[in-house]
Image (cartoon, helix red, strand yellow):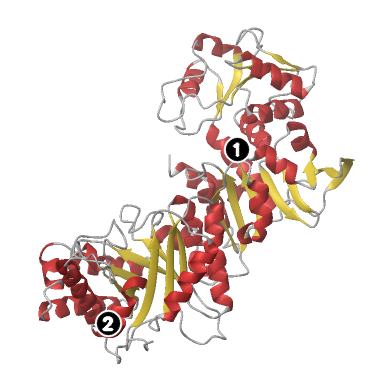
Amino acid sequence: MAAAAPGAVVPWDGDKKKKKITSVCVSLVAPSADMMIRDAAQAANAGARMVEFRLDRLTGSDALALTSGDDSRDTLLKRLADAALENDICAIATARPKWEDPGAGDVFAGAGRPGDSHASAEAREIEAMRTGVLCAASEAGFACIDVELDAAKAFRAEASPTRHAKTIVSSHNFEETEDMDTLRARIARMWATGVADVVKVAQMAHNAFDASNLLALLEEAAHSNQPMVALGMGPAGLCTRILAPVFGAAFTFAALDDASAAAPGQVSVDSMVNLYRTPKLSRSTSLFAVAGSPVGHSKSPLIHNSAFVSEGGVDAVYVALEIPKGRLEEFLESTMLGNKLSGLSVTIPHKEEALSLANVVHHVCASIGAANTLVRVDEGWYASNTDWVGVVDSVDASVDVASSSAFGGATVDVLGAGGAAKAAVYGALERGAQKVRVFNRTVSRAEELVAMIKDDRVEVGITLGDDANGGVLLNTTSVGMVPDTEASPVTDSSVLPSYRVVFDAVYTPRDTRLLKDAAAAGCSCAEGVDMFVSQAVLQYLKFTGKVDVGALTTLREQNGVQIVEELEPAGDAKVVTDAMKAALLSTL
């Protein structure tokens, strides 16, 4: 093992009595040394404390200099190391071969894996040259050298015993996340090389179970005081990068910007530092998430984390969890990450299963038969549904309501028969609708929804617009969503003047074909953006205690489950609402 390079910042070192800060390391993948030096300064300005120079990504004259084996190589390496020191950040030298990462740069293309008896003489020569580059980097002022597990023995034999650079021994799997026993055995081999100051494991994560296992490895290492990085690659692994400080990682990785990711699943340093606030997270940070499948497209992490920031930096973070259908209960009960969650937003396909897990259930949620919000309480999980509130609040906000609601005494036509339609029907009933008609292309599904609700005010719709009497039209289908933006669930726009208000749950695009036609017909328009934000705000208030889920009023018990109602939210939610809406609109 080595001492830190003179003047270098090695963030995981220091007084163990002080609070450990997990640094964000930005991978630099530009094709020239000049561009990497420029990017290092940009990364430092963005809040990174570490940069990884991906030497394998260099091209042209810089690639030739790097592989020359003479003074031009050493001069190039020193320029890069000095650039990091000038910006007061830690520099990692990485020269990734294609035998470890098929997506690596071409500088060391053809290098043979150490110990491969079938490798050609040329392949062994290129690998030896690569080892020479890493050894030279360790003498050029780099604070850290990344060495693959299979190359650690050769590096140890060639590197100077008096080198100052720390060594990161790394292992990557771009196909899957291996089982825990296999990973623990590999980590033991990495430490057994005798050269590791930090070990790094990166695995392709396909779901939240994979991500949780990698975070569990981090926690095990932290308890043993062994500096470690464990990352899940791909969208399902993003949460491991964000939550790294919560579980004691030595550091975590980000991209300089969204276009320059060095590995699948990297997000920009700006998002890591300013949205997720990763450097400020700790073991005491409250964890929230959206659970769904697929969930990588969700805007919920963007708007919830923006809300945390807007309220002066609430010590909480919100991530996306890819949980396969039918496995929500298993995840929450059997995984380390599931056991640490304080609350969940729940989306397709888990809303019915989420309700079945709860010991305490909001009375409207019980009626709807689906939950989109879970909050951990003393009794277990408290389930509620904010979708219906999002629909009706966005409709009421779109008109000048002198009475209690635009739904009061109105005829409400609902397009669709899925979970969102179910919530919309109950919302309309809660707000006093006189009649609710359900329209769906598959009539039998509309009939099933009406039969389930068991309310005389609800019926299957026959002709859209007939006897609407200036009522409310609610579209809960995905018709008109990107990319089919010219489609409308109402093919005959001549019926739209029959309605006072038209609502569209679609928010990409914001101004849908349906809403354009409705505006032309003189209707008030309620946007999907407002619905999405409204339901998320109510979730946020529950997550942060502004709706006191510890002070629920029990209405009855049903099969051992408490059916409850809530108190009104405490305080004004305008700051949170504005922050969420601004964040969402910035992406549309």
Residue farthest to the bottom, as pictured: 162
Quarter of the rendering containing residue 168: bottom left
Name the mark on residue 322: none
Can the viewer see residue 566?
A: no
In this view, the residue in front, 520 or 536, is 536
**Which dot marks residue 138?**
2
- The type of residue carrying mark 1 is Pro
Residue 470 x/y as whole percent: 64, 14
Residue located farthest toward the front when viewing the structure as drawn:
117
Q: Where is residue 376 in the image (x, y as percent from the top left)?
A: 72, 54
Secondary structure beneath disc 2?
A: helix
Residue 361 lies, in percent from the top left, at 78, 43
Residues 150 and 140: in front is 150
Contact between marks 2 and 1 (CB within 8 A): the answer is: no
Q: Against 527, is 354 above or below?
A: below
Q: Is residue 249 placed above or below 70 in the rendered structure? A: above
User: Where on the picture, by quarter, is residue 556?
Assistant: top right
Q: Name the mark on residue 349.
A: 1
Question: Which of the two residues, 371 or 387, is positioned nearer the viewer here?
Answer: 371
Question: For this view, does 429 lie left or right of residue 168?
Answer: right
**Image point (77%, 54%), residue name:** 380
- Mark positioned earlier in the residue sequence (2 or 1): 2
Mark 2 → mark 1, Cα distance in angstroms? 50 Å
Residue 83 appears in view: yes
Badge 1: few (under 14), some or many (20 or more) residues near its Cα, within 10 Å? some
User: Helix, strand or loop at disc 1?
Assistant: loop
Q: Image quadrant for the C terminus?
A: top left
